[in-house]
Image (spheres, coloured by chain):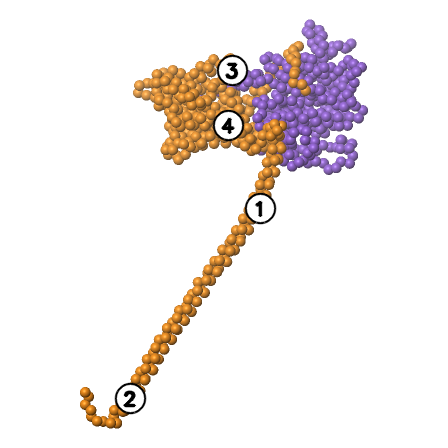
Amino acid sequence: RKDGCRTLSLSAHVGFDSLPDQLLRKSIKQGFCFNVLCIGETGIGKSALMSSLFNTNFEDSPSTHFLSSVRLRAQTYDLQESNVLLKLTIVKTVGFGDQVNKADSYQPIVDYIDAQFEAYLKEELKVIRSLFSYHDTRIHVCLYFISPTGRSLKNIDLLTMRSLESKVNVIPIIGKADSISKTELQEFKKKIMSELVSNGIHIYQFPTDDETVSEINTISNGHLPFAVVGSMEKVKIGNKMVRARQYPWGIVKVENENHCDTVKLRRMLCTNMEDLREKTHAYYELYRCCRLEKLGSRDVGPENKPVSLQEVIEAKRLEFFLEMEIKEEEIKQRFVQRVNEKAAMLEEAEQQASMPILTKFEHLMLMHQEEELKLGEKKKLLEDEIAQFVEKKAIAELIQSQVSVSTPVVSLK
Amino acid sequence: PCAGPVENKNEAAMSEMVPEPRQKPVVPMKPIGINASLLGYIGIDTIIEQMRKKTMKTGFDFNIMVVGQSGLGKSTLVNTLFKSQVSRKSSGWNREEKIPKTVEIKAIGHVIEEGGVKMKLTVIDTPGFGDQINNENCWEPIEKYINEQYEKFLKEEVNIARKKRIPDTRVHCCLYFISPTGHSLRPLDLEFMKHLSKVVNIIPVIAKADTMTLEEKTEFKQRVRKELEVNGIEFYPQKEFDEDLEDKTENDKIRQESMPFAVVGSDKEYQVNGKRVLGRKTPWGIIEVENLNHCEFALLRDFVIRTHLQDLKEVTHNIHYETYRAKRLNDNGGLPPMTVETEENHESNL
């Protein structure tokens, strides 16, 4: 079981040089998948470009400008070229750049990319899994459409591209490039690239380590961002139908490399498809690392001794269990407290409800008493008056009787 | 599901192994895409070349195990298969070299290259198998070794920061050598294959086939096939893993007619009809190893190396390894495995 293996020479043909073919045969049977994400403002030509890149008509309805937030729409197509079956998924942003406040525009995009990583991770972590037949939805390449202003990148471009940096391969392209003249285009491209560099934003670089493709890839790297033109319509030129845009002053041919970089983009995407997929997997590994670390696992413990995932998860589980116990206690206590509170409330309410009746009664009693008193006083007064009157009457009658006995007529003086 | 207490050890060893049904994963349907026809050449088919380049750059690992009693020609056969001295022959016994008292596992790796394809070939020899007086449970060290390789891979896979390419030491193919008795399989053969066909791809071969006539060979093969079937031993290529009709027809033919391959190995060359061929020289003629009329070595070589090598690796990875992983995680309550040292201490800690 040593790792130092010696090299042996074969005395005759063995036949394992057919191994790559065996492997490819299986891959071809299974088919390939490729997932493209197009980010760009509404109306910048995402659908037209996709149809042009893959020289097919992807049916898609134009979207409105009045969405309140950015959404993503995915559509899967089955393509076949010679013996290669490709499941192509095109994901487009809907409503990007339409909102008044674009601060959160990039978030739904980042969330979508993460969600695909998450789905893959979930499948990988299953006990009974089937990775070899899993439909990979991870985004392999992101085409970022830059508006053909001719000036510079917008803030939202910088913000979005930065948020995508370590998550996906980003290829910036200039949409509707037929609205910029050739000289303006050169300046524009230079400006964009220098802005990306000065803002420290890393975009996808076509690989240059393999001699067979390094030359063409280096050249292509120098053409970034690709200035693309797309068209759903075809125009008759000569006796052929050519994908083009017809203007009064001329015809922009999509497949003409002098007119635009669409063919360059197509070539680069196809010849570097495998590299894009590999790099996507590397981004996935990064995501997986962060995710597992967040779940509390470490590869190396506090004394720098390798800690197995098991131990850490066991510790977490214990922690979690204790937490749950405490929470349970808390909830129980809170419940009891609430019950008591409610009971107290009910009692008080009962008291208060019965209080008004008592007070009323007492109040009435008081009033009654007061009235009685008053009446009593009045009665007394009245009785006094009657008594006085009776007295007066008696005196008056007495005087009357004395006056009638001796009646000298005395003149009253 | 573990069996209850075993009363008789012998009984347990010879008991009927009820094969645990492999749990099939829930495979979500791949989304049916809208069929779009390309109106011109795009260049998507270049991906094949890209993949080919990638695989040739990274190279391949292949691990083959040979099991059988000593003297059956295992090392010679492996050397003939790979046309080089990958296995050190134990013929020419030194006085000091004894047959090991227990089954030993010896893995030796070599790097070989052909047509730009680099292969790291590891041959795992099992000296001592079937050579003891009492051979009870002599497959256990082998099963243990195979599971250890799965464990190693699983540990690497479960790491947070993991290697871009996990080194693969898992046994992709196990050649089991059957003695050319001409009668039937021995109990040891059945026991070994019953236990091990669940964890590894087993390819049974009839060794030293030059001791049988054509009729004896055909009869013996038929009998062996029948016995394997009756005992529920699924050798590679297993019926349940045929992916489509094409595979099934091809593999059915191999399963029902060719296997087990009756082989002869040799590393010596002789002149026959003006050509130099590998063969064995006997007083009554030269047995040409690569002549299909003489023996089925060429069939075995084509099967293992030229057509099914990648499939052997894939079945190991997608089926055997996954079965091991699922069992391991289930035993641990869905958690990845612990370090090896503590494995013996904690039986089922969760």
State which chain disc 3 sits on: A
* Between marks 4 and 1 in the image, the one whose residue lies nearer the viewer: 1
Amino acid at circle 1: Glu
Q: Which mark is residue A298?
A: none
* Between marks 2 and 3 in the image, the one whose residue lies nearer the viewer: 2
- The secondary structure type at the circle numbered 1 is helix
The single residue placed furthest to the front in the displayed view is: A413
Image chain in purple = B
Residue B59 quadrant: top right
Amino acid at circle 2: Glu
Q: Which mark is residue A329?
A: 1
**Residue tagged by mark 2?**
A397
- The secondary structure type at the circle numbered 3 is loop
How many other residues sit within 10 Å of disc 2, few (<14), some (14-19) or many (≥20)? few
Q: CA distance from mark 1 to mark 3?
A: 62 Å
**Residue tagged by mark 3?**
A209
Q: Is residue A181 left or right of residue B107?
A: left
Sequence order check, earlier mark of 2 and 3: 3
